[in-house]
Amino acid sequence: MLSFLKIIAKIAFFILILLNVIFFTLLYSPVALLVQLKHNDPDLIQTEVIPETFYAFVLKEGIELKTTMDIQNNRLELVNNKFLVIRRRLFMDSQEQLALDLSLLQFSSEMIGLEAGAEYYYQKPLNELSDEEWQMLLHFYLMFES
């Protein structure tokens, strides 16, 4: 009986160590990696690319963005989403949060992220868009989302 309890204790200890490693790996891995785990192609938008006028517009209008973090198809996505939400709330400032949200906007099932929207609607990358085009992309998303 005592050897059985030792085996159970060793298995429980091993499981706790394994969960601890998984937790810290996901919590401290780069956000871009978590985004790519969620979707195969969207890149994480860098905060330097977002114009200050666009950032001010989103804050002033109080626009709530529903991202693909709200959608999960299996348990792995659920875990990944939870870690993204934790990372977003605890470790990101408001500009980084906006960049993550813009990276995960879902225009359609095939088009995820503002970068994909820019390529589709304007045939150019985000860093070449004018302030008005940034705002129009957001309006396109809001129009199709509702």
Image (cartoon, rainbow, N blue to C red):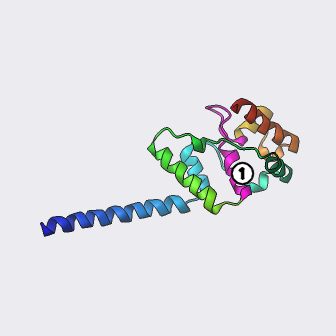
Asked whether 84 falls inside the magenta stretch, the response is no
Which residue is rendered at x = 81% and y = 45% of the image?
61
Label 1: state its secondary structure. Answer: helix
Residue 115, horizontal then vertical, whole percent:
72, 42
Which kind of residue does numbered mark 1 sit on?
Leu
> Which residue has dot 1 on it?
98
**Nearer to the camera, 145 or 131:** 145
Asked whether 100 falls inside the magenta stretch, the response is yes
Which residue is rendered at x = 48% and y = 50% of the image?
79
Using the rendered view, name the quadrant where residue 139 is placed: top right
Which residue is rendered at x = 65% and y = 31% of the image?
108
Residue 19, horizontal then vertical, whole percent:
40, 60
Alpha-carbon neighbours of circle 1 within 10 Å: few (<14), some, or many (≥20)? many
Q: Compared to 16, does 119 lie above or below?
A: above
- Write down the region rendered in magenta: 94-115
Q: Compared to 16, does 115 lie above or below?
A: above
Can residue 3 be spotted in the picture? Answer: yes
Using the rendered view, name the quadrant where residue 92 is placed: bottom right
**Nearer to the camera, 60 or 135:** 60
